[in-house]
Amino acid sequence: MSDQIRLSAEPRTELGKGATGRLRRTGRVPGIVYGYKVEPTPVHVDALELYHALHTEAGSNALIRLEFDGDTHLTVARDMQRHPIKNQTLHVDFLAVNKDVQISVEVPVHLTGEEELGDNDGVLNQILYTVPVLVKPLDVPNYLELSVEGLEIGDVKRVEDLAAELPEGAEFDIEPERTVVTVNAPISEEALEAMEESAGVEADEPEVIGEATEEAGGAPAEGDEG
């Protein structure tokens, strides 16, 4: 990944819950810049511009050239807080990085050849959708491709099988033996029912209050009519 996105920021002169609320109502997102050659500085950015910056092919790993106070810092977005319902970004940290020093990023894993499994009855199960990678900021890949073509039941692909996709000098920030995908045998109806029973899942009919008493010939409770 070499594309860099420019984003303008302004220092925050007012802090606190009331001030951040007013910023958000004007379409701004409060944040903080810290890291390489920059003192921790509260800032705010345009919400729409931030959205576009983080919705390129690079996703949340986009390199952002953050401009404020007459300087430009190479940054990546970290620790974004989102509204639980509206999914709006409420706060964002900008980590200033050195282009010559590795950082740890979560890189998505894209599977290929899913339609060409060796056993048509096999069920593909993806365990890891991203893998942490130590890599220089300008070399961060948008994704790592993993072919599952020809895999059969019982086959496994691990993190180490992605090694050829890494940029030169990059390395995994995770054990290379970790499983990424497996191909499992399909579960029969009988096996599924057995699993449900062992988990205590029952399919009994719900009890209807009042029926048991009447069917057993029981008398109405005291105070009931008829």
Image (cartoon, rainbow, N blue to C red):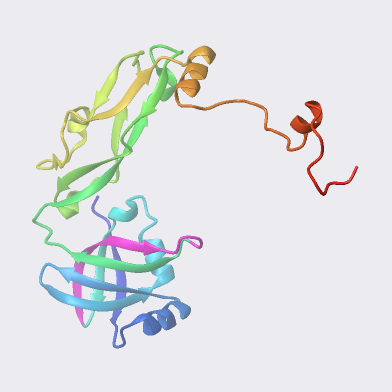
Most foreground residue, 154 or 77 = 154
Does residue 75 sit above or below 201 in this rendering? Answer: below
Does residue 168 sit above or below 203 in this rendering? Answer: below
Q: Main secondary structure of the magenta part?
A: strand
Q: Write the residue at 81% across / 35% down.
A: 219
Q: Position of residue 188 (x, y in %)?
A: 50, 13
Left or right: 33 with respect to 47?
left
Q: Position of residue 200 (x, y in %)?
A: 49, 27
Does residue 176 sit above or below 79 in this rendering? Answer: above
Residue 3 can be seen, yes or no: yes
Does residue 27 sit above or below 134 in this rendering? Answer: below
Q: Residue furthest front?
A: 222
Left or right: 57 with respect to 191?
left
Magenta stretch, residue numbers = 70-86
Most foreground residue, 64 or 218 = 218
Most foreground residue, 177 or 47 = 177
Q: Position of residue 138 (x, y in %)?
A: 18, 54
